[in-house]
Image (spheres, grey):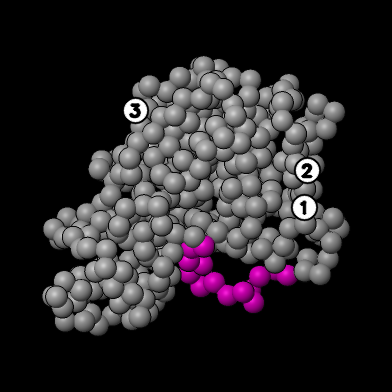
């Protein structure tokens, strides 16, 4: 039978993600709209983005936070183009975005030597084989595979190289060992449900030291330049952005940070995501036709929850369309490069009651597409 109750919010996309519960655009603080981002009010709002992010995440002393162009991709490209070259590089990749960083490093920057440490969708590379004499580039959470690194124990405390971590679907949803991470990037439209086009770049003192002591062999586009005269441009990490940001998006991000603070901080946001994951785990345990793409339970993402179905590709498409047509779940198809299946966002902005309401609809849709043959 068709379930009686629907999720109040059917937005389960893995990016842009659901807005926070109770979100209303008219509640945003919009005094900076129509003003220059270089004005006192504009710079103050951007500086708040940096300072409040650092405060909420509990970043160690000396870590810097900047708002940069082009979402998480822009933040990662800034780091790769500006810092790689003086050491060999280990690139860990097990899904499409990590593989994209590997391609850029090998084919665009032509860094040498590079070790490609690759795994298939659903698995992790052998973390114990990483050489921390090298710079290490990896995603914390494979957004398109639903596979995350389980913790930071595999990262050496006495590393000589830099750890450069794309954490766009992990920040504010998973515990990160900040002292072991030298560069961390994320975007507003993921875990916090913010708007697109803006990235966040977090640098450790070791990363700053690399920037100030090393000049890449290749030319750097203006939007990648973080130093001048061999010194870090500190203004970039005080709200003096390289390009013109959307002050509407800035207001939206500050609203999301305020919401996290109201929850009780990052730990409370993590708890919400973990609770969403528990709903899906319980459902999968009770149904043999659905399973996690991630092989190991400790490696299963609690944000980008990737699932396989006992359906053929055509049935999967009809499964996804049925749920969208019923306005139960939007945009839950697996990423284009990933194996056939579905991907349900379980970040903190998704209410656990909505995740619970969704589960019976998955059963209903499966029966509809498999029994209609």
Q: Is residue 2 above or below residue 310?
A: below
At x 49% / y 55%, what residue is drawn? 191
**Crowdedness of circle 1 by 10 Å Cα count: few (<14), some, many (20+)?**
few
Describe residue 162's horizontal placement relative to residue 268 as left or right. right
Q: What is the CA distance from the residue labelled 2 to the residue labelled 1? A: 9 Å
- Where residue 45 sits, quadrant-wise, is bottom right
Q: Is residue 322 above or below residue 209?
A: below
Front label number (2 vs 1)? 2
Q: Quadrant of the N terminus?
A: bottom left
Residue 247 x/y as whole percent: 73, 63
At x 34% / y 55%, what residue is drawn? 305
Res. 236 in view: no
Q: Is residue 53 above or below residue 197?
A: above
Q: What is the CA distance from the residue labelled 3 to the residue labelled 1? A: 39 Å
| Depth order, front residue of 195/178 | 195
Task: Tell me the residue that label 2 is attached to.
Answer: 222
Residue 183 x/y as whole percent: 59, 35
Q: Secondary structure at mark 1?
A: loop
Task: Tell me the residue that label 1 is attached to.
Answer: 243
Residue 316 x/y as whole percent: 27, 66
Res. 127 in view: yes
Q: Secondary structure at mark 2?
A: helix
Residue 370 x/y as whole percent: 16, 71
Q: Which residues are magenta?
A: 16-30
| Depth order, front residue of 155/175 | 155
At x 51% / y 28%, what residue is drawn? 136
Task: Tell me the residue that label 3 is attached to.
Answer: 126
At x 77% / y 57%, what residue is drawn? 244
Q: Is residue 177 magenta?
A: no
Tell me the number on the disc at residue 61. Answer: none
């Amino acid at each position: 039978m068709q379930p009686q109750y629907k999720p109040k919010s059917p937005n389960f996309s893995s990016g842009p993600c659901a807005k926070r519960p109770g979100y209303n655009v008219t509640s945003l603080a919009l005094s900076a709209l129509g003003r220059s981002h270089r004005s006192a009010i504009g710079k103050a709002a951007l500086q708040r983005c940096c300072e409040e992010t650092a405060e909420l995440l509990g970043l160690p002393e000396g870590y810097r936070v900047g708002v940069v162009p082009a979402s998480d991709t822009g933040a990662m490209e800034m780091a790769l183009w500006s810092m790689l070259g003086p050491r060999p590089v280990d690139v860990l990749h097990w899904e499409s975005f990590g593989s994209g960083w590997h391609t850029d490093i090998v084919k665009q920057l032509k860094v040498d030597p590079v070790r490609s440490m690759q795994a298939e969708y659903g698995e992790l590379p052998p973390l114990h084989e990483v050489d921390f004499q090298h710079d290490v580039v990896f995603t914390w959470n494979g957004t398109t595979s639903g596979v995350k690194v389980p913790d930071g124990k595999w990262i050496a405390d006495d590393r000589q190289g830099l750890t450069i971590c794309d954490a766009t679907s992990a920040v504010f949803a998973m515990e990160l060992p900040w002292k072991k991470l030298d560069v961390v990037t994320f975007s507003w439209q993921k875990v916090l449900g913010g708007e697109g086009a803006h990235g966040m770049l977090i640098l450790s003192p070791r990363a700053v030291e690399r920037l100030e002591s090393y000049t890449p062999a290749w030319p750097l586009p203006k939007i990648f330049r973080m130093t001048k005269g061999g010194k870090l441009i500190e203004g970039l990490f005080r709200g003096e952005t390289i390009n013109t940001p959307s002050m509407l998006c800035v207001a939206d991000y500050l609203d999301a940070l305020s919401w996290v603070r109201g929850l009780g901080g990052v730990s409370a946001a993590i708890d919400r995501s973990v609770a969403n994951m528990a709903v899906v785990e319980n459902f999968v345990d009770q149904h043999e036709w659905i399973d996690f793409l991630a092989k190991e339970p400790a490696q299963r993402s609690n944000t980008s929850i990737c699932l396989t179905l006992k359906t053929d590709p055509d049935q999967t498409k009809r499964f996804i369309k049925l749920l969208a047509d019923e306005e139960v779940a939007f945009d839950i198809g697996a990423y284009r490069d990933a194996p056939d299946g579905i991907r349900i966002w379980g970040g903190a902005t998704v209410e656990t009651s909505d995740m619970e309401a969704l589960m019976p609809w998955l059963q209903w849709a499966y029966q509809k597409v498999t029994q209609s043959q």
